Image: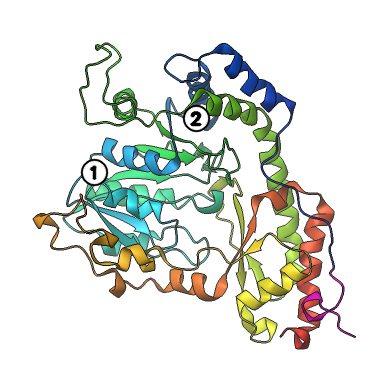
């Protein structure tokens, strides 16, 4: 008789993990408040402006400008940092594609550095090797809610006169040496996409401490208008990237419960890390002592297939899902520089608006090699989604028990 569910046995777990997003009547009331006010856009309403103030204060930033999504926030933050055509922006190879394409949309060139094998965040040594006379900015990604090595990256930036734009899309409330991320560089961004720990379905924000940067970003997001200008006077090449009042209201409501969820994720992550010591071959990423708070958008694991009879990570994930651990994922299946868009001629467009004769030096991304990134994508990295960490301790026990069960019956994994 089979023991493992993937081989026909009984699954260890039947119940689902907590669903996401979480909502209650307070969210319904927030939406009704906007609906009944008749002010559905941020230019007339107050929900978005209140949320900007509240979230910036939560994150420890002097200013916050809410926009339509995190990708737009990245682009506007790069513009505010002075990035433009021909400039190079150093980004990690292990990241979501928007980190790179936000630079491309400005005519800038993403240069991929490798990540630290213990944290999967940007490795300062790899960044140092990528710096050239054309480098304008470094964009660390606080991956999965874990801050990158900001001491090392900021030191590099100061030495070479570079801007630092923090991609904190997954790091609401995360902190480095007691300072919340998004406030350590020239500016930072967060995302409020449906998958994110703080969400309104879509949305993003640029955070900064410089009032001039905040004013620039606000104008860029509001069709180039100025607060003291005529309504139909447009002073900058901007666009309409404003958040709606409905999203602002939901985000304000969600922010009220976020600190409690944040603490629960941290407590469950600490418990799970301790429990995983019993499993040989599945290891949490290392905890840098300078990371004083991890937001845990993802709980990262390193999988060693040699400890599991040579079973590849995709088969291991399939076996875990069969046991009811449905929220375990392989993560990024490709390094960002191996994405089809990065390998395609002209980035897949007949006449890319961001390319001209000055871009003869666009790298051959097919020749880029970041060994740590590639090993994480192909063999090692496992992600537990953040909603798992909103469960009970018995849910964490089930994750560990499923791994133990598979390891004891490796001969049954097809």
Find the distance from the CA under tag 1 to the CA under tag 2: 25 Å
Q: Quick one: quadrant of the N terminus?
A: bottom right
Secondary structure at badge 2 equals loop
Q: Where is residue 353 in the image (x, y as percent from the top left)?
A: 20, 49
Q: Where is residue 387 in the image (x, y as percent from the top left)?
A: 69, 49
Above or below for 245 versus 109: above
The residue tagged 1 is: 83
Evaluate if marks 1 and 2 touch, with contact meaning CB atoms under 8 Å apart: no
The residue tagged 2 is: 60
Residue range in magenta is: 1-11
Is 183 a magenta residue?
A: no
In depth, the one of 348 and 78 nearer the eye is 348
- Residue 184 in sight: no
Give the prevailing secondary structure in the magenta stretch: loop
Measuring 67% from the left and 75% from the top, which residue is drawn there?
316
Measuring 72% from the left and 43% from the top, which residue is drawn there?
264
Secondary structure at badge 1 equals loop
> Colour scheme in the image?
rainbow
Q: Quadrant of residue 314?
A: bottom right
């Amino acid at each position: 008789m089979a023991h493992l569910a993937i081989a026909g046995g009984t699954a260890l777990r039947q119940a689902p993990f907590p669903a996401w997003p979480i909502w209650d009547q307070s969210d319904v009331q927030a939406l009704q408040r906007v609906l009944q006010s008749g002010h559905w856009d941020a230019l007339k309403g107050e929900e978005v402006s209140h949320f900007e103030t509240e979230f910036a204060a939560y994150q420890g930033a002097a200013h916050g400008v809410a926009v339509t999504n995190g990708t737009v926030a990245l682009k506007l933050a790069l513009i505010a940092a002075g990035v433009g055509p021909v400039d190079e922006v150093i980004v990690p190879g292990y990241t979501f594609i928007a980190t790179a394409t936000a630079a491309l949309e400005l005519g800038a060139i993403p240069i991929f550095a490798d990540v630290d094998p213990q944290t999967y965040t940007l490795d300062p040594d790899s960044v140092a090797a990528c710096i050239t006379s054309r480098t304008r900015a470094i964009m660390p990604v606080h991956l999965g809610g874990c801050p990158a090595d900001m001491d090392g990256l900021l030191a590099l930036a100061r030495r070479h006169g570079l801007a630092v734009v923090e991609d904190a899309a997954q790091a609401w409330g995360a902190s480095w040496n007691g300072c919340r991320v998004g406030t350590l560089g020239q500016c930072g961004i967060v995302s409020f996409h449906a998958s994110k720990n703080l969400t309104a379905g879509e949305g993003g924000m640029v955070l900064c401490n410089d009032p001039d940067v905040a004013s620039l970003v606000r104008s860029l997001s509001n069709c180039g208008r100025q607060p003291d200008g005529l309504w139909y006077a447009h002073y900058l090449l901007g666009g309409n990237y404003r958040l709606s009042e409905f999203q602002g209201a939901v985000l304000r409501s969600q922010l009220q419960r976020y600190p409690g969820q944040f603490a629960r994720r941290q407590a469950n992550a600490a418990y799970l890390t301790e429990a995983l010591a019993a499993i040989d071959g599945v290891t949490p990423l290392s905890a840098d002592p300078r990371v004083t708070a991890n937001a845990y958008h993802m709980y990262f694991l390193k999988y060693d297939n040699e400890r599991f009879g040579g079973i590849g990570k995709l088969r291991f994930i399939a076996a875990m899902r069969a046991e009811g651990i449905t929220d375990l994922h392989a993560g990024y299946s490709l390094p960002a520089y191996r994405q089809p868009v990065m390998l395609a001629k002209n980035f897949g467009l007949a006449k890319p608006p961001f390319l001209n004769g000055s871009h003869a030096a666009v790298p051959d991304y097919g020749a880029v090699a970041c060994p740590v990134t590639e090993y994480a994508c192909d063999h090692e990295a496992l992600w537990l989604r953040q909603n798992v960490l909103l469960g009970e301790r018995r849910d964490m026990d089930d994750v560990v028990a499923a791994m133990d069960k598979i390891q004891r019956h490796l001969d049954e994994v097809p």
